[in-house]
Amino acid sequence: MINSEQINAESLSRFRHYINDCRPLMKKQYEQLLARDLSQQRWEGCFRRNVPAVLEQTYDAALKQLLLLPFDSSDSRQDKGLLDLQTGSGLL
């Protein structure tokens, strides 16, 4: 029988893989936004404008991914409303 620590470890592993898969996509998205800005001669603020846009989309997608994972909090303690989902190998 699978216990909550194993379920959480597997969920964290799946999330780790998801994040690793996002990295090349984030770079590509940034390059596309930068190319759009440069083609429109919008030189100033390219970094300040495009990095947060990529991060916002990535964070939103990562949160949705986390919500889909089957974390088991039945054996976890709460601290200030947050669950301690650590496994033997740490969080992420």
Image (cartoon, grey):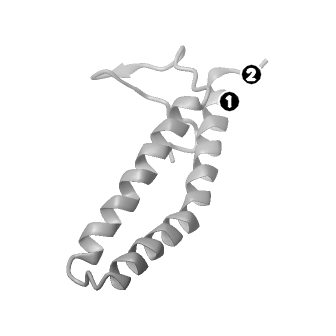
User: What kind of element bears circle 2?
Assistant: loop
Tell me if residue 33 comes above or below residue 8 in the rendering.
below
Hey, which quadrant is residue 3 in on the image? Answer: top right
User: What kind of element bears circle 1?
Assistant: helix
Coordinates of residue 52 in the picture (x, y in percent): 31, 61
Residue that badge 2 annotates: 2
In the depicted view, which residue is nearer to us: 50 or 62? 50
Coordinates of residue 25 in the picture (x, y in percent): 56, 64
Local packing at callout 1 (Cα closer than 10 Å; few below 14, some 14-19, many 20+) is: some
Local packing at callout 2 (Cα closer than 10 Å; few below 14, some 14-19, many 20+) is: few
Tell me if residue 44 comes above or below residue 25 in the rendering.
below
Residue at 68% over, 30% down: 6
Hey, which quadrant is residue 72 in on the image? Answer: top right
Q: CA distance from mark 2 to mark 1?
A: 6 Å
Hey, which quadrant is residue 14 in on the image? Answer: top right
In the depicted view, which residue is nearer to us: 78 or 61? 61
Left or right: 64 in relation to 55: right
Residue that badge 1 annotates: 6
Please say if the residues under marks 2 and 1 sit with CB atoms less than 8 Å apart. Answer: yes
Coordinates of residue 41 in the picture (x, y in percent): 28, 85
What amino acid type is highlighted by mark number 1?
Gln
